[in-house]
Image (spheres, grey):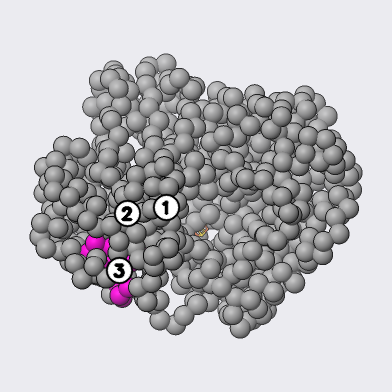
Amino acid sequence: MKSGAAGGVDSVVLTTCPRDCYDACGIAVVKRDGAIRHVRGDRNHPVSRGRLCRKCSIGYNGAFLDPEARLTRPLRRVGAKGSAQFEPVSWDEATAGIAERLERIVDGPGSHTILNAHYTGTFSLLAYFFPLRFFRRLGATEVDPDTICNKAGHVALDYMYGTSLVGFDPRTARDSRCVLVWGANPSASAPHADEHWLSESPARTIVVDPVRTPTAAKADLHLQPFPGSDAALAFALLHVISRDGLIDRDFVESYTLGFEEIEPLLANWTPQRGEERTGVPAELIEQAAALYGQGPSLLWLGQGFQRQRMGGNAVRACALLPALTGNLGKPGSGFLYLNGTESRGIDEDYLAGSHLGSDVPEPISHMDLVDCLEDRRQSQALFCWNINIAASNPQQARLHAALRRDDLLTVAIDLFATDTTDFADFVLPAASFLEFDDLVASYFQLTLSAQVKAAEPMGEALPNTEIFRRLARAMGYREPELYETDATVIETTLRRSGVALDFAALSARGTISIADDPIVQFAQLRFPTPSGRVELASDRAEADGLPRSPLPLSDDRPPADHLRLLSPASPWLLNDSFANDPKVARRIGPASVALHPEDASARGLAEGAEVVVANETGSVRLLVTLSDAIPRGVAYSPKGRWPKQEPGRANVNALNPGESADMGKSTSVHGVHVTVSAA
Ligand code: SF4
């Protein structure tokens, strides 16, 4: 503590950012006389090094602290569904009103007609997992959160490696000669990893991305395949690796299964053929293959390139690279999709109460949510928490219409009045991460961090945990797991994890690594597949009706006059968080679509032109920007804007038909075709 410039008393609370972001930055919350004055990066934190990303720096000091922007009281609908007309009610009135409707549904059509839609709005462990205890006890149907993001990649890696959640330790990059970033844009989704980890690595970097992102622009090699041709590019790289004797035959023989089914496929995929199918110059394919193949190499598999029709196949094809080159089980090698909590010893089953409820229905996909909401037999109630489906989901126009159903009990939990809360019958105000204790497990670094309460919840807002304790009480449930306090859950989680620290000790340290030295991924070269080997060809995939092994497929190019739409992360938004912050909104400006100058010229469009971007699913009006960072044939419009803030009350997801990818009923949002014409 010390005296501040204005004579008040300053104190600093160290906490952790729990956004859906690779970085998990350490945060310093500066308080004066008990009130938050400033939220900034923790100077001593190894990731944030004193700076937050631009969006969080603005948002955490803006909308997150603004009582006018925050939801501060429970609300009950008084106007037409979707009109956002509410009256404030007490917590008891809100939870009793919700419970009364839920009980009628449970006794009538059944609890499986209650849908539980959630995602990563606040991605700390208790805020994410604890509410699942309530839904399991209730017997609700979960809308599988991964299906809106990355499920195809999880399924693909599970076939081949038995897990998608054991990645390389980023610290092992000190022993790498090559880091290959495939289909990720850390400059937007992991800004500190981009600025520090990638740039400071002694390794040479290869980026595979259709767009010349800032990460791609500074890479040693940038391969720019047309979207949907990743698998073909992987096979072209493997052709060169094989031709040049860089297949690690001993490794393949000892630790993989099915190479004899892959090897014949490599012969035809010459760099020239790769160039024809992907647009990547043969010379670049040669250079990248030599660099990666010689190793030790790391492969960062992003989320972006699996969001397409054959996204699972694409991930399987890329995931051949480490196995065939022996880039596994030694320092400086490996791959990463996500580092799951298991590596930190986190007991997700305990957190989520997996034992509760005897008859839990099969989850549904976000790709099927609209169909489900349009069918009264399948859906009588919808909970949305940690998610804003009215902004983030496909089939936006149909979804908004379905959410107007008067008979659908809709409960939305959020910090802010989003598009989704506008459709709710009850809106419950959630506390921000600055207002409760929790734990954060980065899905990149192998660390565990404390999220420390820095202020009381704003108004009557409550942490997710307490909201679901109150709902459980209103339902008359008796299971003690539904009422465990946050402190008990945190201490139990820490004790089971084996970190040998209580929360006070972890808070004092902020962030800890789970090992002093870099951990070697798959050091024992045992893989959690049925065979214990890397299953290049998979009986399980075949049994699921999929090809036994990855194939060198590429999507057809869009039909004449059409462009392939990419709607990835904006550096100014995190999913759809921060779009409502006025300063962020000013920075991102009006909604736009970036085109290659030649595509714009072919359509008679100049910079700033207003255009209609359309397909059979919907249309949006956007302003054109010109950029040669975008390949020909692509329209680029970042996601995350809020429909109700747009002139046409729709964002880019109005164009997404919600077609499922080849695996996991996952999104194929980057496979959408559109026309772009002058408005
Ligand atoms: S969103 Fe990511 S980069 Fe931004 S402050 Fe949070 S952890 Fe750091």
Magenta stretch containing residue 248, yes or no? no
Q: Which mark is residue 255?
A: 3
Q: Residues within 10 Å of mark 2 (few under 14, many from 20)?
A: many
Rounded to the nearest whole Å, what is the CA distance between mark 1 and mark 3?
A: 18 Å
Q: Earlier in the sequence, mark 1 or mark 3?
A: 3
Q: Nearer the viewer, residue 439 or 267?
A: 267
Where is residue 369, by image quadrant? Answer: top right
**Mark number displayed over residue 540:** 1
Q: How many marks?
A: 3
> Of the residues shown, which amino acid type is indicated by label 1?
Arg
Q: Nearer the viewer, residue 113 or 579?
A: 113
Mark closer to the chain start, 2 or 3: 3
Q: Amino acid at mark 2?
A: Ala
Give the percent coordinates (x, y) of residue 610. 41, 21
> How many neighbours does mark 3 have within 10 angstroms: few (below 14), some (14-19), or many (20 or more)?
some
The secondary structure type at the circle numbered 3 is helix
> Is 395 on the left-hand or right-hand side of 83?
left
Give the dominant element type of the magenta stretch: helix, strand or loop.
loop
Q: Amino acid at mark 3?
A: Tyr
Q: Magenta part of the protein: which range?
A: 323-335
Point 78% across, 67% down: residue? 485
Give the structural element (helix, strand or loop) at label 1. Answer: helix
Mark 2–mark 3 Cα distance, whole angstroms, equals: 13 Å
- What residue is pinned by disc 2? 537
Out of 67 and 421, give the one closest to the viewer.
Answer: 421
Tell whether position 327 is magenta: yes
